[in-house]
Amino acid sequence: MRPAPIRPIAGRPPTSLVCVLLCEDQEVFRIGMREVLEAQPDMAVVAETTHLPEALEAADECRTQVVVVRQGLVAGAALPLLRTLCRRDTAVLVLAEPGTESEPEVVEILQAGVRGYLPRRSDAQRLVDGVRALARHEAALDPAATDQLVQYLTDPQARPAPAVRPLDRLTERQREVAELVAQGLSNEEIASRLFLSLATVKSHLTASMRRLDVRTRTQLAILVNRDSSPAA
């Protein structure tokens, strides 16, 4: 069972202070960041959580300006929550651990709306400067991460190849036959539509099913419809 926000702080800080929420599941790091930030005359840590869903909730309650979160807590299934958080009037500073700074994941994080990305083991002043920059609606990006992003966005070989769709394995004629099967046409109707002999239609159909690893016309129709849908 996930804990509730650990440390909501009673009362509202003066409006001149930068209100920060810490989303960090390792207590030693969380305590260290809190001490560093609260030592600043222009900052106040208004809440602490250990998971992103609680951070999303606490950010609204505490009128947070900047959320500092460990990268491991925003990856994968948590990305939609990160997007939601970034769409609000809240800046997010993601702290990356060694080995998590892969280009595709950094791109996903920045595309979600994150404007701050620094190593988790940054020194205290770097953390403070990053929070201040985000509070001023500026970016706070680690130079190494910026270099990685430039390479990722400008070098096609650095990006993963697009996924091959099932119908791309077929020839143009095989695909035409498969699509007509998906529309419910019989072999005879397909032959008439494409001006082919019945034997040729059967040959294309057999080859298509073999290449797509399906055994029945129904399976073929389902695969074609799924592959042709906009969400595929």
Image: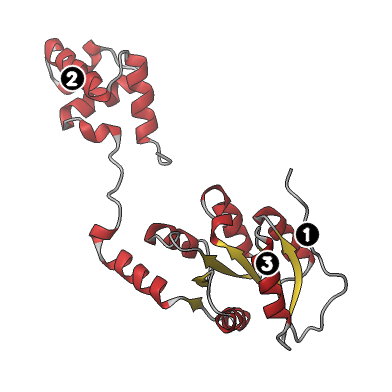
> Which amino acid does the dot numbered 1 rest on?
Ile
Please tell me whether mark 1 or mark 3 is closer to you in this view.
3
Residue 192 in view of the camera? no
Foreground residue among 116 and 127: 127
The residue depicted at 23 percent of the width and 58 percent of the height is 157
Q: Classify mark 3: residues with Cα within 10 Å, few (<14), some (14-19) or many (20+).
A: some
Single out the residue that lies furthest toward the front: 28
**Residues at marks 3 and 2, CA–CA distance in whole angstroms:** 60 Å
> Which amino acid does the dot numbered 2 rest on?
Ala
**Residue 96 vs residue 184: left or right?**
right
Residue bearing mark 2? 207
The residue depicted at 17 percent of the width and 19 percent of the height is 204
Foreground residue among 178 and 194: 178
Residue bearing mark 1? 6
Labelled pair 3, 2 in contact (Cβ < 8 Å)? no
Where is residue 83? Give x, y as percent.
57, 59
Residue bearing mark 3? 30
Foreground residue among 209 and 144: 144
Question: Quick one: label 2 or label 1, which is nearer the N terminus?
Answer: 1
Q: How many numbered discs? A: 3
**Residue 60 vs residue 117: left or right?**
right
Single out the residue that lies furthest toward the bottom: 41
